[in-house]
Image (tube, rainbow, N blue to C red):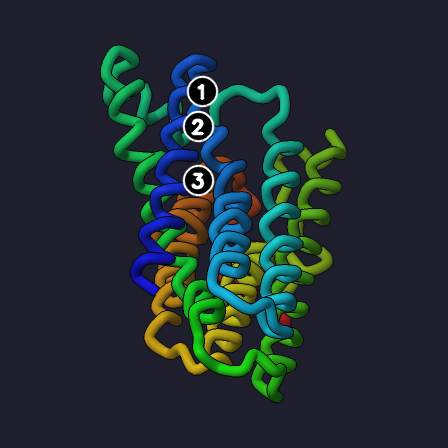
Amino acid sequence: MIELFSQAALIIFTLVTLLWGWSVVIKNVSIVDIFWGFGFVVVNAFYVFMSGELHARKIVILTLVTIWGLRLAIYLAYRNMGKEEDFRYQEFRKNYGPKRYWWFSYFQTFLLQGALIMIISLPLLGISSSKSSGALSIWDYIGILVWLVGFTFEAGGDFQLARFKSNLKNKGKVLKTGFWKYTRHPNYFGDSVVWWAYAIFSIAAGSYWQIIGSIVMTFLIIKISGVSLLEKTLKETKPEYRDYIQRTNAFFPWFPKK
């Protein structure tokens, strides 16, 4: 398992280094966001094909992770196409200074993302490196069901938001329909659920401690880079958002409050 993990880490750190080099050339760190989902596809495919016999559970997890990761990468690439660098990285570039940020971004953003990909993907390592037969059990079917729920919320939420933003009349307004009627962050909720589905597959394979990857992903989404960061920005830029907060759950879907 350690050898498999080390080899995958070498691949990821090579890729993020090359990506960093390209970001320096084009002066846009935002491309690292597009790599996020794709990075998990690469790591998981390496685990699946380099860990021995290809059995039913590996085929299922290869399919699900590939669909999830490529969908996310394509969506972010489309969303960022033709746009300037994300405001987060612009702030970092401003604070650290353009003459310093080009190399600082390698450690602060690219290497950090590579490390997070390796930690969060631990359930995927647990599935592929398991000595179990790989035959699907009731837990695997529960995992598939949970994944479908999470993917529907994540992809559906992204689609609804993209369609909402495409209408210029909605500029400055808050999306309050569809999945967004029941949670302020259906895409983040769905993302977290998807990773708990991978944790269930890991448990089904007899790999338990590896679900720490799903715990880390959920913590990051809620407390660090997802819900918490976005909420702060939206409160400042959209007056309607404060009323939306009073009526709608932040993360777990539920009926709107009166």
Query: Label 2 belongs to which residue?
Result: 19
Crowding around mark 3 (Cα neighbors within 10 Å: few <14, some 14 to 19, many 20+) is: few
Q: Position of residue 118 (x, y in %)?
A: 37, 53
Above or below: residue 136 compared with residue 233: below
- Number of numbered tags placed on the structure image: 3
Between 15 and 153, the one lying in front of the other is 15
Kindly identify the amino acid type of the residue bearing the numbered disc 2: Leu
Q: Tell me where residue 165 appears, x and y as whole percent.
A: 69, 37
Q: Which residue is mark 3?
A: 233
Whether residue 111 is visible here, answered yes or no, is yes
Q: Amino acid at mark 3?
A: Thr
The residue drawn where x is 54% and y is 71% is 197
Is residue 223 visible in the rendered image? The answer is no
Q: Are marks 1 and 2 in contact (CB under 8 Å)?
A: yes
Quarter occupied by residue 98: top left
Give the labeled residue for mark 1: 22
Relative vertical location of residue 48 with respect to residue 28 in this rendering, above or below: below
Category of crowding for the residue at label 1, using alpha-carbon neighbours closer than 10 angstroms: few (below 14), some (14–19), many (at least 20): some
Camera-side residue of 254 and 27: 27
State which mark lies toward you, 3 or 1: 1
Secondary structure of residue under mark 2: helix
The residue shown at (36%, 30%) is: 17
